[in-house]
Image: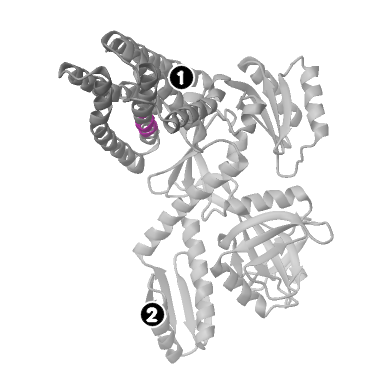
């Protein structure tokens, strides 16, 4: 008998539709207005503080829906936006000095649904509200760092080659090498030119060489700096769970960062501005730190204070920088004291191995470095950054180190966790500064959501009415498939990590609503043709679905390819449109071909039918 449902088709349709509906369900519960309290650099959140927050709110006649403590932060859920503002101001006065108090929106998903991994769709900045940052990268500092690496490389290479030199000095935009005799200078020029194709070497006189980066190399350094910072910023925000960020390059040295759902910029700015890295240096044991404090600092040394304010005399030569760190996590040593375990890439492991091989028994310092803006600009209009350095650890090298080692001497587990987080997220290759910030209010986002929902509702309603009038009973089947298609889009968007619904994305859904019935129209018109040619209803249904399949597949594949190209080359809004378009194409094919066929077979298949209502 024609048009009988097979068990696998029925089960496939039911399981897939039910799964998508289950993961679409969190979107009907909405979100709570919330205040998020996160610890600052030296602060810790405990269960006692949760009780204190409740008491503080009660003293100010604020009744929260509930207070939650998880992931080292407190989340206070309140009933409306007015209460949220009052509660934020109250908690900011009480805890603002040591903690970050930020307004947020928290999903109100039931616990049983959360246990299954159900979360609502992430909304973009134009729908949910949030903050927008424009950040500027300090390109001069990245060039200086690259020159410093080249200078250290020259010294190592010349020593290994046995070429004697008098000095290697780093200037503003070049490195100057001085030799003892003309023969050594000739050998060094030949050797270094072959070893460093990205540098241009010029001879100032018989004994002095000058090395500068080529223009192509400078451009590569600047491009890599922006790209690496983009990756690191995204990692930082993701690891701290602030929001799903939109991070894009703008121009030659600027980065756009959008954080949907964040209404208070304090915490986000603290995270994004944390330009931190490490340097590993040897202590200068040949000179006295007291002489350096009296103004007699040796040429190759530098005085840096530790966390207790005690000055330490360090060698200027950097053994290793934080750019080689690929992983860092906190823990405790055999004495129960906090530590940070560090893993290096292969190049960093080789550098650390060479540096510590000849320094066993000597103390090595770990220097923590931050760049902070002075608020001033230079003659070229670029922001001026000031470098802050602090010795966070001094440890004696007991054995030759490699790609894995640990930092000890930290004050608290909290300090170890913060340091590991910054290093794990990545050391920014160049300082950055927020030059512009904007906040999109939740009321504007809500208005965009309402207008978008109106467009989807009107579009869906008109299509449903048309299909019902034009195709009668088969129109009801098409309408069921269309509604199922929308549910599946929402469920898949909620399920995909990182997928964000934007206003253009809603436009993609509206377009999908119109396109989703195309496949049904093709099938139904084919069935009508078969009926006009004298075939029986069962034969007409069978041939209608089989004949229309190739046409439906070809049409949707070409549209899907177009969406794929938009996603590959487009930016934020275009990507949002293309994502919903591609998901809609896939779900519409599934519902039109499989779901409607299962329903049609269940209603008309396997029985004697004299006439079809189509």
Q: Is residue 591 above or below residue 366?
A: above
**Which percent across, then down, holds residue 197?**
38, 73
Callout 2: few (<14), some (14-19), or many (20+) C-alpha neighbours within 10 Å? few
**Which percent across, then down, holds residue 414?**
75, 47
Q: Quadrant of the N terminus?
A: top left
Give the label on residue 194, or none.
2
Q: Does residue 412 appear left or right of residue 388 in this picture?
A: right
Residue 106 within the magenta-colored segment of the rendering: no
Instruction: Give the quadrant of residue 486.
Output: top left
Q: Does residue 560 appear left or right of residue 153 in this picture?
A: left
Q: Mark 1 points at which residue?
A: 449
Q: Does residue 123 appear left or right of residue 81 in this picture?
A: left
Q: In which quarter of the image is the C terminus?
A: top left
The extreme left residue here reads 533
Numbered disc 2: secondary structure:
helix
Which residue is located at x 56 percent, y 35 percent?
Answer: 243
Q: Distance between the residues labelled 2 and 1?
A: 61 Å
300 or 103: nearer the viewer: 103
Name the mark nearer the viewer: 2 or 1: 1
Callout 1: few (<14), some (14-19), or many (20+) C-alpha neighbours within 10 Å? some
Task: Using the rendered image of the protein, determine whether residue 370 is visible from the camera's viewpoint.
Answer: no
Q: Which range is magenta? A: 580-587
Which residue is located at x 43 percent, y 22 percent?
Answer: 484
Which residue is located at x 53 percent, y 51 percent?
Answer: 431
| Mark 2 and mark 1 residues within 8 Å of each other at the beta carbon | no
Taken as a whole, is the magenta stretch helix, strand or loop? helix
Task: Indicate which disc, 2 or 1, sits on the residue closer to the N terminus.
Answer: 2
**Which percent across, then down, holds residue 378?**
47, 49
């Amino acid at each position: 008998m024609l048009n009988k449902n097979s068990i696998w088709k029925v089960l496939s349709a039911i399981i897939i539709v039910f799964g998508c509906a289950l993961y679409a369900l969190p979107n009907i519960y909405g979100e709570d207005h919330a205040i998020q309290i996160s610890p600052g650099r030296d602060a810790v959140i405990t269960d006692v503080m949760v009780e204190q927050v409740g008491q503080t709110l009660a003293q100010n006649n604020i009744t929260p829906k509930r207070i939650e403590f998880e992931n080292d932060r407190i989340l206070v859920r309140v009933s409306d936006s007015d209460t949220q503002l009052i509660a934020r101001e109250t908690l900011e006065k009480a805890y603002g000095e040591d903690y970050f108090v930020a307004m947020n929106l928290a999903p109100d998903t039931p616990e049983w649904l959360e246990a299954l991994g159900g979360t609502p769709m992430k909304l973009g900045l134009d729908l949910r509200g949030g903050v927008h940052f424009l950040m500027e990268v300090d390109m001069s500092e990245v060039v200086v760092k690259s020159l410093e690496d080249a200078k250290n490389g020259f010294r190592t290479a010349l020593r290994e080659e046995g070429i004697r030199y008098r000095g290697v000095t780093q200037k503003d935009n070049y490195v100057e090498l001085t030799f003892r005799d003309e023969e050594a200078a000739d050998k060094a020029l030949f050797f270094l030119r072959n070893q460093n194709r990205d540098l241009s070497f010029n001879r100032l006189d018989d004994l002095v060489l000058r090395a500068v980066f080529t223009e192509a190399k400078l451009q590569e350094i600047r491009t890599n700096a922006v790209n690496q910072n983009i990756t690191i910023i995204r990692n930082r925000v993701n690891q701290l769970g602030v929001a799903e960020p939109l991070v894009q390059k703008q121009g030659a040295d600027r980065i756009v960062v959008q954080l949907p759902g964040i209404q208070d910029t304090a915490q986000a700015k603290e995270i994004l501005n944390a330009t931190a890295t490490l340097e590993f240096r040897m202590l200068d044991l040949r000179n006295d730190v007291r002489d350096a404090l009296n103004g007699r600092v040796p040429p190759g040394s530098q005085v840096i204070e530790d966390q207790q304010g005690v000055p330490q005399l360090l060698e200027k030569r950097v053994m290793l920088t934080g750019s080689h760190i690929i992983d860092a996590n906190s823990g405790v040593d055999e004495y129960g004291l906090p530590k940070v375990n560090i893993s290096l890439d292969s190049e960093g492991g080789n550098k650390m191995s060479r540096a510590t091989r000849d320094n066993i028994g000597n103390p090595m310092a770990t220097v923590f470095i931050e760049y902070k803006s002075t608020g001033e600009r230079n003659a070229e209009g670029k922001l001026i950054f000031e470098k802050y350095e602090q010795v966070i650890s001094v440890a004696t090298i007991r054995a030759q180190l490699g790609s894995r080692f640990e930092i000890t001497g930290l004050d608290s587990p909290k300090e170890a966790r913060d340091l590991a987080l910054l290093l794990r997220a990545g050391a920014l290759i160049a300082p950055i500064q927020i030059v512009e910030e904007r906040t999109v209010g939740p009321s504007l986002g809500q208005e965009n959501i309402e207008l978008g929902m109106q467009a989807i509702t009107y579009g869906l309603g008109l299509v449903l009415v048309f299909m019902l009038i034009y195709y009668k009973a088969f129109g009801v089947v098409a309408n069921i498939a269309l509604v199922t298609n929308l549910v599946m889009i929402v469920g898949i968007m909620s399920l995909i990590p990182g997928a964000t619904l934007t206003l253009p994305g809603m436009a993609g859904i509206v377009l999908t609503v119109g396109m989703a019935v195309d496949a049904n129209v093709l099938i139904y018109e084919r069935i009508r043709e078969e009926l006009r040619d004298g075939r029986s209803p069962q034969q007409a249904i069978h041939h209608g679905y089989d004949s229309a399949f190739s046409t439906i597949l070809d049409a949707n594949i070409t549209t899907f390819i177009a969406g794929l190209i938009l996603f590959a080359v487009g930016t934020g809004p275009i990507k949002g449109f293309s994502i919903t378009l591609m998901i809609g194409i896939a779900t519409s094919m599934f519902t039109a071909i499989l779901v409607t066929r299962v329903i049609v077979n269940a209603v008309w298949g396997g029985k004697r039918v004299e006439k079809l209502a189509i």
